Every structure is written in C-alpha cells, then in structure tokens.
Image (cartoon, coloured by chain):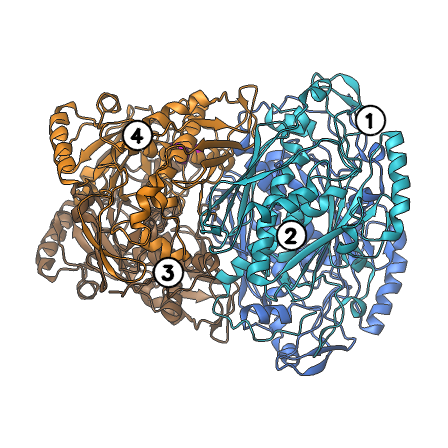
Chain colours: A orange, B brown, C blue, D cyan
C-alpha cells in the first residue's frame, strides 16, 4: 500500500529528496545470518553515482552509505536494515529560476496538481537522486541472491538514440563510459554526445538486464506473475516508458510455431519467453528490456506555463545527464534483484513442501 | 500479498479453473450507492466469451454472471460483491493426450515444477478462461468510473502478426471480428487467418487501450507509480510480454526536445508520455499498448518432454484461439479500469485536503 | 488492504450477507498436495451452524459447503480454493419492523452512517452468518496445520454471564449444549438460560482457544507480532470486546518474579505468557481468551431512534442466540488456525536458512 | 507484509536496535500541506524517554529527533517523512553477562530460535527503545488528526500491581511521576515502588487511552474492524498481554439489556462498547485498555538455561524500568493515533461519495 515501499517479503521503503538532508532506506525481510557490510553496497552506488561518467551530470556526490541497524558482528540478524546516505553537493540556487515553472515533460506539474505543494529544488522527490537508495537496497538483494542461491544479475545499455545493437554483454558495458554492450558503436556514441552537448539536448535509451541461475517455480499464475512484478519494478524507474520480457513486442509479429520454446532432454531449445512461462520462472535466463525516455531537463528552450497559468519559456540549467539511461543500468539491476529475491522468499512460503528436485530440466 | 488478488482499495480476488465447477470473484472496495446489476457486467463478458468471434475458439460458453452479494435494492452497499460464472462447456477428454506432456511455450512445465501437481484439464488455472472474471470485475470498475467520475475506457487491436496500423479506433474495432482498428486491413487479416487455419498455427498481436477524462494527480512518485501499476496489471494478462505507456520504446530513439510534451495555456501540445508524468496522471488521455505472444496451443507438432523426462511430440488439439489478442481487448480494458479506479480511490485517501481545482490545465 | 480479507500468505476473502443468495470465500496460499474435500470442512460448520444447539437461534441452515476450485483429484493444487454456501432459510419479513430503526448496541447505525445505505435484512453483512465462511476457511487451515505440521487447535466456553470456571477442557465442551468446559456448571447454566428465555434477554461469554504443538519461532518482533496478529483476528469476530494472551489482564497485578516463565533443561516451568515471548512463539501452548458481549438483538424493549431521527422503541423479534458465545467456539478456533498457518508460512519465507533444530527446548 | 511496518494508507516503518547507531522511521501517507517541525514531535518523545521519571530506568537519552525528508518550508509535501534519533547512551558492557543466557520471560530465546542469531546488547530489536520511533510517528499522526480533523488523544495509567482506580484522567496523570490517573493513590504507589526497589522486582500495569471527537464511520465490517486494528496496534506494544475496547471482559458478565448503549435524540446514553459498533466508530469516545506484564529484566535471580543448553541463574543488571507501564502511556497514545489516522484516510477512499452529514447523532 505504502507508495514508497516495494516488495512483500523482502520489502524496501525509501525516503529523501534531491536537496534534503539525506536519503534513507529501511529494508525488511532480509534473511538472517548473511554476511553484510557497507563494502557490499558501495560498489553499485559508485556505478550509479553522479560524477561516475564524463557523459553524466557534473554533480559530484560521494554517495557514501552507512548501515545503521540490522547487522550484528558482520551478519544480518533478520531485523530491518537501515541505510543512510547524506546529501552533500546540493546547489539549490540553480533552481530558483524554475521554482514557479512547470518544465515540460517533467513531473513539476503533476506533483503540484496532486499535492498542492512541491519541493522544486532539484525536482525534490521526483529526482533520479532517489534511485541511489534503490541501488543500495538492490546491492543487499544481490548479496543475498548470490550467497544463498548462487544467482547473479547484470546489465548493459543496448540502444542510445538511434544507435542500437543486438549484442548483450555486461562485460563490454563495464569497459566504456556509456555502459554500452557493443564496443563497435563507441565512436558513434561519442559523436552523438558531442552533438547533444552542442545542442544542449538529451536522448533516450534501452537498457537490458538479465538474471542467471534463477530456479524454476518463482512467481504466481494470476495477477502477481513474476513478469508482472518485474514490469511493475521496471516501469517504476524514473523515465521508463516501456518494458519487455524476452522478445517482447517482437513476439506480436511471430507465429506460435516460431515463438514457442521447444524442449528436449537437454532443456529448452530457445528463450523467446525470457525465462518466464505462465507467470512462473522456467529455470532459463530472465531477460528484461526497458525503454527510457530522454530527460526533459535540457538547455533547448521549451514552451510551458508557470503556476500562475502564464505562458513562459523553460531552459533547465542545473546539472543534468544528457542520457539518463547510462546510469540506469545498476538501477535496473537493483530492481530486478529486489523482484527476484522477493519472489524467491515468497515461493519458500508457498511451496515449502514441494520437492524442488522433481521435474527440473537441465539449466542453461 | 495474495497472488490472486489485484488492487489495494478496489481489490479483486478470483478463483476457478478452466474445467472446474465455476469461476468466482470477490470485489472489495466498491463505493456504496452505485447502481449495479448483472446487465452492467454481461456485455463485456459477451465481448470476451468463447464463441463470440469466428476467429476464436469454438468452445461456446454463455458466461452468464450472477451477483451473489454486496448489492441491495439495485445499489452497491459498500460490502464485497461476489460474482459467479458456472462452467458449462468443458470437454476434458480433449486433454487426456497431454496430461503428462509439457506443451512448449505453455505453463504446463512451470506449474508442475512449482506446485508438484497440476490440473491439466484445459490448462487449469493457467487457462485464459480465468480472464472472464477479470472482465466481469473490470465491468464493475468501468461502471463506477463512469457514474462517479465520468471516465471511459476503450480499446482495439492494432497489430496481428505483421499486419499493423497507426490508427487507433475503438469504434472501428467493434465493427469487425478481429476487433481491429483499421478497416482497410480486414481483407489482409482474413487471408492471414485462412493461412493460420490451413497450417494449424497461431499468431501474436498488439492491443491498445486508452482512458478518457482521467483527472490529474492519480498515482505516486516512487515505486507505486501509475504507470508501474498499469504495467503490472497488463503484464499480468496471459500471453502479454511487452507493455508501453505513450510512445514507449520509440521514446528511446528520440531527443528530449522532441519527446517532451510542451504546455501552453490551452494545455499539453502533444502526448508522447501517454498521460503520465513522474508516475502521476497529467490529465491527458492514458495510452497503453501491450504485446501478446502467439498461443502455444497449436496443431503444428512441436518437440517437448513428458513428466517422466522422455522426449515426445506435442500437438494441441482442444479448442483454441489462433490469436488470443482478438479476445484480449475487453481484458486489457478491464485491467486498466481496475488500475484507474484503485488509483482514484487511493488518491482520495492521500490528498483529500488538496483543492482539486488548483493548477489544472484545460483537458483534451 | 481489502477489509474483507485476512492473512498475508494464507489469505481468506469472504463475501455474503445474512439474507443474500449465498456466502462465498476464496482461500489463497494453501500449500499444494494436501488432501482436501468437503468432508474436512463440514464438521466444523456443523458445530457452528444455526440449529446445532437448543440454546441458539431456531434458524436452521444446512450450511452445506461446496468446493468450486483449487482441488484436483482430491488434492490441493496451490491455486485458490473457492467455497460456496447457499443461504436457504431466510425469513426477511421478520425484519420489516426494524428496517428504519437502529437497534441499540447493533451496527445498524454505524453502517448507515458509513455507507449511506444498509441491507437491513438479518443485519446484512454485520450478521454473524458471515462467520460461517471463517469457520470453513479455518477448517482448511486446520487440515493443513494437522497434515503438514501436526498442530491441533481446540476451544471451549469458560464463562457465561457470571457463571465461570478455571477449567479448560475442549473435550468436556463437546459433551454439553453450552460448549462449556466445566460439567459441574451445567445445571446453573440451564437455570440461567431458562431465566433469559423468560425475560427475552441475552448474556455475554468468555471463550478460550488453544493451539498445541506450535513450533518456536513464529511471529515477528515489531508491529506484526504473533500476539498482535492473534488479537487482530480475535477482535475481528462479531461481538468480541476483549482479548487476552496467556494470563492477560491478571499479569498487570503480578510481579516480575512471579510472572516470568522460568526455564530448565526440561523446558519452560510455567506459561503465564501464553506461548509467545517478544511477539514470537516459544514452543509452548498458545493460550487465548476472548470476551463476547451479549447480543443486542433481544426482546426487552430498548430506546432508540429511527433513520429519520425520531425516538422509538426497539424489540428485536427475528431468530437470535441468547448467548452468541456458545456458537463462537469454532469461529475462534478458525481464526486462530488461520493466524497460525499464516505465521508458519511467512516464517518459511523469512528464515528458511535457519537450522530449525538449534536452540529448541523440550516441548510440553 | 513487512513486519516492521504499520498501517495501510498512513504507514510507519521503523528500524533500529537498542545499542545500534540510531533509530529511524519512514512515515508514508502523511497528507500534504500540514505544518510540521521537530517541535511537534519532541514533547511526546520527552514524555517517553528514559530519564523522564524517577521511577524509570536511569539510562538517559536525549532522544532528539531530526526530520530528514518530506517537509518543505515548514509543510508536509505528501512525500515520505524520514525521522532519525541517534543512540547516545549505550552501555553495552552491561550485557556481556547475559550474552549467552536466555532471560526468563524475555525474547532472548525466541529470537535466537527464530533467527539463529541475536543482538544481545540491551535486547537489540526487542528492547522497548524501539518504541521511541512509534512515539515520534504517533506525534506526527496526532498533529494531522488535530489539524485536519480536530481529534485529540490522551491516556493515563489506571492500575499498577494491585493498586487500581476507576478514575480516568489524563490531566491528573501529567501531575505525578507514575502517570497515574488517581491522585489519591500516589502515596500507595510510592510505597509500592520502595518495596520493588528493595526487592529488585518489577510490576505490571494497566494503561488506558481515549480518542475524542472521532467521527462516525471509521473502520470496516469484517476482519479489518476498527477494534481489530486497535487490538493489533496495542498487542503489538512490548509487554502487552491484554486489550479491551469499552467495558471489555466485564461485558461477558452482563446481560444484553444492560450492555447495549441506548440511543435518544440527544445521542447515545452510555458507552459500554467503547465507541465502536460492528467494527465501525459510532461517533462516541474511543475507549481502550491494555494490560502490560511486569518486565522480566529484574534483579531477583531466576532459573534459565544458556545457548548451550546448560542450566544457569539469571540476574539482569543493566538499567531497567520497575514498571514499563509508566512510560507506556505515550506509546499507547501513539499507536491509537496511527490507527485512527489510517482508518480515517482509508475511509476517505472507501466512502468519499457518502454525504457525511446524514444520520449523524449529536456527539458527546
């Protein structure tokens, strides 16, 4: 119910604004006896943090996370884990110009219409700054997934503007500042970003994330399907406007004889369905794609109105990413990790008496 | 938490298998004092029911719904509304051939792996038959949306296989048996279905749904965004593998100057974002697209294994739709209706003290 | 969130009014592979049903339950179980006299104030008739608790009016029509009920329920304690106004040296805490007491007003229990069963990686 | 689902151990536009804080609360409110003696059995220290209840050991260090506490809380009744073992003609039901009583075992309250405030279209 909470057994609840004192997160439902420290969380935060890439915002935040509860002598205790990240690099004066204006494409107007008040500094709660805590919580989920289930999650950018690739490679993505999976497109991307910088414009992106070694049986048949839960998690990320599982929209153009994943003694022969059948994981790789729209915080003047209903021109100065997709990889990984851990724990409650070894196909 | 429930204030909970005695639904959170009878529900069921189109399954179900509680002297009382639809046209013997086989692309394998048991008759709970109750519940949501908020919802098929259109027209869709929005494509579709019938194959589809006159302010900033909730609802429909809000994946290729929806005194000048900004409705039309994969219940023989791990050939006889997208239009409308009513009621709890007339732009 | 749902993993959702067509319940989260049929449910319904005791309402309902889904070849499948009980003995004309009056002590006034409409026939949703479905769902919970965990639950009446006992005996309770635990008080009770019949009055009661062989570790430290969950379940039963765990209010008068349950190698040496410490089950017997107020549906004239604000006299004819506590034993058992099964399943999700054999004391 | 969260629309989530770095709370669902600062929260914290009474623990914590989000220019924004209280007066060495022992009557044993690990310092999460955050969150709820609904909540201690009173007076309670409602019993209480100090023992208590000016209509008919929600909230407080609404257990001994609250044009003529009928508030004062057991942290030696299964003697030195009931008044008030605000907001979602002025009796 709580809008700022995610998950049912493994639950994360966040608070914090772009220019407030701090961001905080309470993670409930972490299994006990898992080794955990700040060192397990900080690396993912470092991948997301502003200042991590030349092609992101120049705002520079250390994003140093502190665990305040739920860990005793290096291990989780089963009680809720509190995380705090202090905000240190606010430059609120950047925003005085837009305090009364609704940036087109941004949440300024909808927040004010809903709440009758808004913290305009850096977008307040609508800022992507909030996603730092998702990444931190996701790092905890990844640690549990890895330690207790040997599951790993990775991701990459596979399209920026009209530059796209069929290659999926999390490894390649770590080797360039665009987190892009295809090294052959880096020069094109550099040219694109030079153009964006010149024009003060931004561009959209496609991010892909995958989970490896996910057991068969996670999820539910109706409403609370694993793919539905993933779609909820992914569409809940700032700027995301599309989600695909497996081949996604391409499946609409296929025939059944082509789209079904045939099975032999060696396991599934293809993975068009992205590792989920009937809302339940099949034991194959979970494959997810998301589309992020271009940020609306740009230097190109746009038409809008202010809170008094007067028309005005909006130019967003501040410090913004020309492509929010680049820093979105760890965010998408984090949300997938939270989804899967929640589904795993829930499955333990639902089917604890089912022999897990029955009917399991050889995995990838 | 309950996997077979949807929504938080307006909550629907369903049960029932394809070949069981009946389907049932309990709808909680319907506001009191709304006029309601079976006549408000049956028309949408008739649009979805098997036998409604020549291009669907030949299974013929009356799908006659009965209200068993929550309505007194023609009006809702605020107590939960119970709905029952009896199953009348089961032909379970069709399924004896596949009781031990896993149809590729179907949930047979994942159900058995999860639960250690499965009702193989007609797919049991994984059958699209379950969606009858979603449509019934959605019809109740539509009635409330219409009576109390003047909101309407409609939809159409905009792609089947490689035949697609940019036209959105719910009106056109009512005039052909494909529920297709573009009348110029009907001949192509007839040819396609003739081919499918010859080959015993199936095909995927894209369905679009829209909501009109939705007020600004519904949804939440983080996690429980309106678009996240819609993505959850849509991806929870059988066979859906992709969801887009507004321009969806096309936004990934756009620039910010192009994708943002500019604002003047006359309101928004475009609707790339599909009526949702920062997770909150903007007062524009809500625009949603979903991709449905081709059904895996086809006559084309496919490779699989049986529950004993032996390889086998699967041919699904039964009575199946060559394109499940055609009958999915009322299902997608229903889920959107449930989403919006839930978000509306929740918004009443969240922001009851905000003057709703402030900051509202002229609507479409 | 749904007000008519109970539980988080094992979830029951009910609908139905006293004089509607039927009562229904959807039970979600039943583990798969449990043998289940109507025969496992009917006996508890028979203990609760109107007409089961001379000292209850003369309304006579067969309360025959039908399973409509979730069971296949005699076993649960993990999908939701639908239950239906048809209403057969409505005599709605009894209620025409009170359709506009608010019976003092009853929910007539509060329902109308909340919803602006009420189904006055037999109290509508506020009727204890609704509890039939709790008993049915509880019987399913009991079956699972017994089959998978060897846990049993029983109960008895330990006070009616000023006749009370310290004896706890579920066995004795089955042998008299008052469900009373102390056979030495039966003559006193008969005299009391003769007096109530003469005067057309009713009386309150205390019901006790216990759970045997509950493992240590169920529940949670904060907010969602096992005792909190039990208190919620019990106070949610019609007419209940007090709940005690273990020695309850008597503990307020004790000293710490007296109230703490000391431990030796043989286990706990007393059970003042009722089997729950810090919100978590201790492995001892769970002990719960509830106080039920006397029903307000009596023949003794009372002062009230009608919906037009006019003062009036109320005499409730209908067919009512002089002591609702008598038939409440299976209801309280049912709610305790639902609580414990939910807590057990949730614990499987929370602490699946903890070795259950560590630190466990010898049980009773 | 999250065990450390409370409420559905107004939701509080807490973390923190007795001897950890800090306590934190995230409050979701606070309506926007309410004036709020630390000054609105600190006074209730000061009533609860250790060191506030001579008759409590000598541990002295400033319990200075800091708001880190959700408030902008002095007003709530509708986004989640983060609260932090740093721990400053830990003396963990006090606990080395009991790190391996299970204090009888305490949660030491059940925590270890559940989680396989426990933070033994000061009881970790099971410490009443955690209630500081409930009080802080309750103070926010009280502020909203007061500002938007003109509802107030107060409380007092009405029994300590065998010293009890029928007087309810929150005003009197503020004037003595026992928070006791009856000034005539203060000398008796002083003698009692002198005796407790001499013997190193503790004692139980009864705390009463009431809510004034609560509108009619809050709550729900089945399961999620207002009284059920209150029982859940109250039984979730450390050491509480009994909850009564209105006359509670005394109602079991009454007759219907005596227990029902008759109604005239002037309103209800009595309040045996404690302001709740059929699970829904009646517009009368909400009356709640709770029983707290004596703390088990005492100097009187007790028998127990250690984690190795060896028998041992336990003497709890540390710094403990001889009667935890004394400092529990603001905690019980806080939980009642959270309950009522949650029920109020939910009611806005459920029945927004009901004319609130219909059928409302004159209030107290």
Compared across the picture, whether B6 is left or right of C59 comes to: left
Mark 3 — residue? Answer: B138
Q: Chain of mark 4?
A: A
Compared across the picture, whether B340 is left or right of D213 comes to: left
Circle 4 crowding by C-alpha within 10 Å: few under 14, some 14–19, many from 20: many
- Number of numbered labels in the structure image: 4
Q: Nearer the viewer, mark 3 or mark 2?
A: 2
Circle 3 crowding by C-alpha within 10 Å: few under 14, some 14–19, many from 20: many
Mark 1 — residue? Answer: D299
Q: Quadrant of residue B215?
A: bottom left
Q: Nearer the viewer, mark 4 or mark 2?
A: 2
Q: Nearer the viewer, residue A224 or B60?
A: A224
Mark 2 — residue? Answer: D336
Residue bounds of the magenta highlight: A337-341
The span from disc 3 to disc 2 (Cα, nearest Å) is: 36 Å
Q: Nearer the viewer, mark 1 or mark 4?
A: 1
Q: Nearer the viewer, residue C277 or D165?
A: D165
What is the x, y in percent for residue A97? Answer: 29, 49
The span from disc 3 to disc 4 (Cα, nearest Å) is: 33 Å
Circle 1 crowding by C-alpha within 10 Å: few under 14, some 14–19, many from 20: some
Report whether residue B299 is seen. no
Q: Tell me, yes or no, whether the two marked residues, 3 and 2, touch with CB atoms within 8 Å.
A: no
Q: Nearer the viewer, residue B203 or A89?
A: A89
């Amino acid at each position: 119910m709580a809008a700022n909470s995610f998950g049912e057994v493994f639950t994360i609840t966040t608070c914090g604004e772009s220019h407030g004192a701090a961001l905080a997160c309470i993670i409930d439902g972490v299994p006990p006896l898992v080794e955990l420290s700040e060192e397990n969380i900080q690396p993912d935060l470092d991948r997301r943090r502003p200042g991590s890439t030349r092609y992101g915002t120049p705002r520079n935040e250390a994003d140093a996370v502190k665990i305040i509860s739920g860990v005793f002598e290096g291990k989780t205790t089963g009680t809720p884990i509190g995380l705090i990240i202090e905000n240190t690099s606010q430059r609120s004066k950047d925003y005085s110009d837009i305090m009364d204006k609704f940036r087109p494409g941004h949440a300024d107007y909808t927040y004010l219409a809903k709440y009758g008040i808004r913290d305009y500094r850096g977008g307040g709660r609508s800022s992507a700054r909030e996603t730092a805590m998702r990444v931190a919580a996701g790092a905890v989920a990844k640690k549990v997934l890895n330690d207790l289930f040997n599951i790993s999650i990775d991701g990459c950018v596979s399209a920026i503007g009209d530059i796209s690739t069929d290659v999926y490679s999390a490894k390649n993505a770590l080797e360039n500042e665009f987190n892009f999976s295809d090294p052959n497109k880096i020069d094109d991307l550099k040219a694109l970003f030079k153009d964006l910088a010149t024009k003060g414009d931004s561009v959209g992106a496609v991010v892909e994330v995958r989970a490896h070694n996910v057991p068969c049986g996670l999820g539910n048949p109706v409403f609370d399907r694993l793919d539905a839960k993933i779609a909820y998690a992914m569409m809940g990320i700032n700027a995301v406007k599309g989600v695909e599982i497996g081949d996604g929209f391409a499946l609409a153009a296929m025939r059944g004889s082509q789209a079904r994943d045939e099975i032999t003694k060696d396991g599934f022969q293809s993975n068009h369905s992205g590792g989920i059948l009937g809302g339940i994981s099949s034991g194959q790789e979970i494959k997810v794609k998301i589309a992020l729209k271009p940020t609306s915080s740009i230097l190109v003047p746009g038409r809008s109105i202010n809170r008094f209903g007067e028309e005005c021109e909006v130019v967003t100065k501040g410090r913004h990413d020309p492509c929010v997709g680049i820093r979105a990889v760890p965010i998408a990984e984090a949300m997938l990790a939270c989804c899967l851990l929640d589904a795993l724990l829930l499955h333990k409650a639902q089917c604890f008496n089912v022999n897990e070894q029955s009917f399991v196909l050889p995995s990838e």
